[in-house]
Image (cartoon, rainbow, N blue to C red):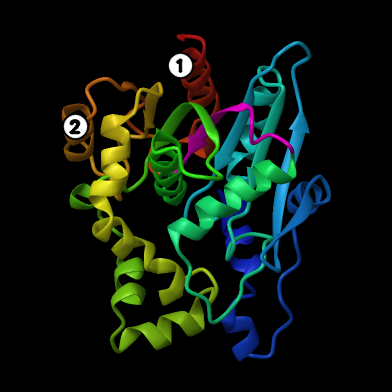
Amino acid sequence: MRGRWVWVGLLGVPLLALYLHLPPPRLSPELLSWRSSGAFFTYKERSIFYRDSAGAVGSSDVVVLLHGFPTSSYDWNKIWEGLTLRFRRVVALDFVGFGFSDKPRPHRYSIFEQASIVEGLLRHLGLHRYGINLVSHDYGDTVAQELLHRYEHNRTGSILIKSLCLSNGGIFPETHRPRLIQKVLKDGGLLAPVITRLMNFFFFSRGILQYINQRKKHRERWVGALKATSVPLHLIYGPLDPVNPHPEFLQLYKKVLPASTVSVLDDHISHYPQLEDPTGFLNAYLSFIDSF
């Protein structure tokens, strides 16, 4: 857990350090190793970090991992090795504005742009004609929904989606409960300038946080993509999640998407199941993959 918050604080350079003229914190050895094992590609003059690992010999399957807010591809580090034992290629990226990728400002961050970046990365890697297994979390769930919409509507540049596994994300705006700091920064007000001075500017900024409003505005497009798809769907859910609370979220998910399979992890697992219970998450995912 500590590593994740070091990652969040460092890569945007905390404003508190700038405000007090302090040097930024150093990367942990784990994060240095993660960065050194990755690479960058350019999307519309933006430098985007990604990791691409060769995995199981004899497998033709590719898995692409889409991280959540406000973190990065490092969220997948605890299940990375396990995935390489099953998949031919394991790929993850830092969305623009996150992790080691560029954090332009001012910039109108949008789910549509992030989806296009994923498509651009897969073209860059020569994987755009392969069937892709998507695994997503939180913010990444919404990016995956947009990719699914494009796939189902045969949009130019869309990727070929073989399966989709969602986890603990704001799939339904009506059951999503943003954390207090997200509400304050999204809506503005007197506290927003104070909090942004004490927090990471790039992550906790009105630009990136507008994805909450985008989910509401485009609900029919993104929930509709899940309802209409014939792609195998699965949900891995940590039931102690304060952002997508139990049982409201799970009840709505099963009602709206009855064809989807679901794995509910132990009662103490919360919003980051891939970090809190990597073994349970990986086993649930591989069971889903082996079911079709």
Is 3 or 145 nearer to us in this picture? 145
Question: Residue 228 placed where, x, y %?
Answer: 28, 31
Question: Residue 78 placed where, x, y %?
Answer: 63, 35
Q: Give the answer, above or below, for where 230 lies relative to 16.
A: above
Task: Judge whether residue 8 is colored magenta.
Answer: no
Q: Residue at x 67, y 37 (%)?
A: 91
Question: Residue 105 placed where, x, y %?
Answer: 57, 80
Q: Residue at x 35, y 67 (%)?
A: 182
Q: Amino acid at mark 2?
A: Val
Of label 1 and label 2, which has the lower sequence position?
2
Q: Which residues are magenta?
A: 126-137
Q: Residue at x 74, y 17 (%)?
A: 56
Query: Where is residue 217, by image quadrant?
Result: bottom left
Q: Give the answer, above or below, for where 184 lies relative to 79.
A: below
Q: Residues within 10 Å of mark 1 (few under 14, many from 20)?
A: many
Q: Residue at x 41, y 76 (%)?
A: 206
Is 72 or 269 nearer to us in this picture? 72
Query: Where is residue 145, by image quadrant?
Result: top left
Q: Is residue 157 found left or right of 193 in the rendered image?
A: right
Q: Please give the residue where the numbered disc 1 appears in the rendered image.
A: 288
Is 149 or 85 nearer to us in this picture? 149
Mark 2 secondary-structure assignment: helix
Q: Amino acid at mark 1?
A: Phe
Q: Please give the residue where the numbered disc 2 appears in the rendered image.
A: 256
Question: Residue 238 placed where, x, y %?
Answer: 36, 34
Q: Is residue 232 found left or right of 251 in the rendered image?
A: right
Mark nearer the viewer, 1 or 2: 2
